[in-house]
Amino acid sequence: AVVAASAFLDGGLVATYDVRGEQQALYADPGGDTDRPVVVLVDGGTMSAAELLTGALQDRGRAVTVGTPTFGKGSVQMPSELPGGSVAELTVGHYRTPAGRNVDGRGITPDLVVEE
């Protein structure tokens, strides 16, 4: 999501997240194309990193979002090794958009709701 956001933002905050009580931030690289208009199409299949990107572009006023509300998967997951070599992805935190919105279980409402 950060790499994609960097294409459309000139640096700045993409998202924050809390893992085990420690606040972290993700920032876009400077130099993205900020001259072209951007429209982001979303629906219930838009989730996780795509929601991070959508939230960043929407909150930063960089894109107009169109469609139906997104899925609402804003969780941070970390791999944990299990006995026998298996790995489980455990939720350890939640992402927030630059405006502080927690999308987990809520999703993102587009600027222009257009039903399918």
Image (tube, rainbow, N blue to C red):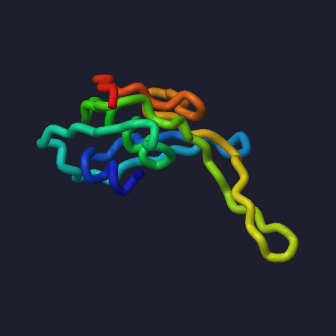
Residue at the image position 87 percent from the left and 71 percent from the top: 83
Q: Quadrant of residue 59?
A: top left
Q: What residue appears at the point 69 percent right and 62 percent down from the top-left corner?
A: 79
Q: Which residue lies furthest to the left in this view?
A: 35
Q: Relative to 79, is 110 on the left or the right?
A: left
Placement of the C terminus among the 4 image quadrants? top left
Q: Which of 14 and 116 is in front in this view?
A: 116
Instruction: Using residue 4 as the reference point, say whether residue 34 is left or right of it.
Output: left
Residue situated in front as seen by the camera: 98 or 52: 52
Residue located at (47% from left, 41% from top)? 15
**Does residue 111 appear anywhere in the picture?**
no
Q: In which image quadrant can residue 38 be found?
A: top left
Q: Quick one: 26 or 71, which is closer to the camera?
A: 71
Q: In this view, does 94 lie above or below 114?
A: below
Residue 62 image offset from top left, x and y in percent? 25, 35
> Up-down: is 39 above or below 87?
above
Pinpoint residue 64: horizontal percent, then vertical percent. 25, 31
> Residue, x 35% and y 38% (percent of image)?
42
Could you tell whether 1 is left or right of 116 in the image?
Answer: right
User: Where residue 33 appears, x then y in whole percent?
Assistant: 18, 49
